[in-house]
Image (spheres, helix red, strand yellow):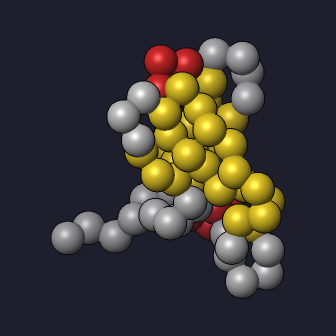
Amino acid sequence: MKPFKPFRICLSDGKSFAITNHDIAFVKSTTVEIGTELDAEGFAEHCAECAILHITRLEDIPAARAA
């Protein structure tokens, strides 16, 4: 199994979300739930629910910048 590779989800409204570990994003049937504003322990303070149809692209994030 390959290790997780950080990436960014870009949406049609111009917003983007950095997915820096595999526990931040949860894919549902028509949406992706993304944990935002992580605390010092990596727990999400808030959650954004994004429609899969509004995802315009995924971008790799270099590992050094993802931390």
Q: Residue 13, located in which quarter of the rendered image?
A: top right
x, y percent for residue 14: 73, 21
Residue 57 visible in the snapshot: no
| Percent of width and height locating residue 46 | 76, 56
Q: For the N terminus, give its image quadrant.
A: bottom left
Tell me the residue at 59%/32% (across/down). Answer: 50
Q: Nearer the viewer, residue 40 or 58?
A: 40
Nearer-the-camera pick, 27 or 61 = 27
Q: Is residue 14 left or right of residue 61?
A: right
Q: What's the residue at 60%, 49% (across, down)? A: 34
Q: Position of residue 15 (x, y in %)?
A: 73, 29
Apparent side of residue 36 relative to residue 29 in the rendered image (left or right): right
In the depicted structure, whether residue 41 falls above or below residue 13: below
Q: Residue at x 68, y 73 (%)?
A: 43
Q: Quadrant of residue 8?
A: top right
Position above or below: 37 against 30: below
Q: Is residue 55 left or right of residue 39?
A: left
Query: Is residue 11 placed above or below 50 in the rendered structure?
Result: above
Query: How far from the left and from the top, in percent, is residue 63?
Result: 56, 63
Direction left: furthest residue: 1
Left/right of residue 26 with respect to residue 67 in the rendered view: left
Q: Residue at x 63, y 16 (%)?
A: 12
Position of the C terminus, as image quadrant, is bottom right
> Which of the 4 quarters of the picture holds residue 48?
top right
Residue furthest to the bottom in view is 41
Please indicate, yes or no, whether residue 17 appears anywhere in the rendered image: yes
